[in-house]
Amino acid sequence: MKRVGLFGGTFDPPHNGHIHIAQAFADELKLDNVIFIPAGDPYHKLRQSNSTAEQRLCMVEQVIAMDKRFSVSDCDVRRKGPTYTIDTVSLFRQVFTQTQLWWLLGMDSLLQLPKWYRYQALLQSVNLAIAQRGEQGLTELPNDLQGWLPEALAKNLTTPDGADGGRAKLLQASFLPVSSHEIRAEWSKGKHDDVPAAVAQYIDQENLYRA
Ligand code: ATP
């Protein structure tokens, strides 16, 4: 059974923390492929960054060259209107039929999951790989997920490989202390060591993140 990981994000810019967690995602779940899925442009208006979705996509293209298991999809960049994770997952479900699909998520996002559009359908259609971010932990799990998580963790260990969703795994790797918003804020001060050289070169060439 093929195993594919989906890694959604704004990637404005993609940084070493993303690469570290994507590699841990692939290693710990023995994934054949991790597909980076940059978000579309509505995000851009909210965050007031001067990068476009096309530029974020180009930066992710630099990153995927670093590991042969990595690839990128432009499906959310091309989609008009709001992007919901359930829609993105449904799209990949149609393409990857005989495949175990995993979605990578930080613990901070897991705690917010019951607020996501059609989150229960999402939990059934994809498996969740959860990475620890900062101090937030399972003790803060919302009531709506308290019954689901132990079952989903057990399902991953006990159910034979299948192309279904509903599993969960807590990754051993945790987040590196780096974030895109800090990189954007610090860029003009010359702090460029948290992104790969090819991404740094692209940012300078396109004049991104100038105050
Ligand atoms: P921002 O600082 O602008 O909020 P970000 O650094 O959190 O951005 P995103 O593009 O929003 O980056 O994140 C994409 C995905 O990568 C999310 O699932 C997020 O949880 C994860 N991620 C973000 N930062 C890290 C990190 N330092 N280590 C591991 N994973 C990360």
Image (cartoon, helix red, strand yellow):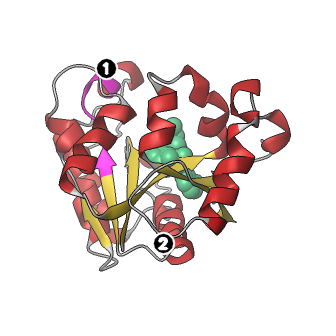
The residue tagged 2 is: 23
Task: Tell me: residue 209, above or below residue 132.
Answer: above
Q: Which amino acid, mark 1?
A: Lys
| Residue 19 inside the magenta-drawn segment | no
Q: Residue at x 28, y 22 (%)?
A: 42
Tell me if 142 is positioned left or right of 106 in this view: right
**Separation (CA) of disc 1 from disc 2:** 30 Å
Q: Can you give x and y, in whole percent of width and height, for residue 137 in the image?
A: 79, 44
Which residue sits furthest right?
Answer: 139
Give the crowd class for mark 1: few <14, some 14-19, many >=20 residues within 10 Å: few
Secondary structure under badge 1?
A: helix
Task: Tell me: residue 176, above or below residue 94.
Answer: below
On the image, which quarter does residue 71 sit in? bottom left
Q: Can you give x and y, in whole percent of width and height, for residue 9 in the image?
A: 40, 44
Q: Which amino acid, mark 2?
A: Gln
Q: Nearer the viewer, residue 119 or 106?
A: 119
Tell me if 69 is positioned left or right of 103 in this view: left
Secondary structure under badge 2?
A: helix
The residue tagged 1 is: 45
Residue 35 seen anywhere in this rendered image of the structure: yes
Q: Nearer the viewer, residue 186 or 28?
A: 28
Q: First in sequence: mark 1 or mark 2?
A: 2
Q: Residue at x 64, y 50 (%)?
A: 152
Residue 177 seen anywhere in this rendered image of the structure: no
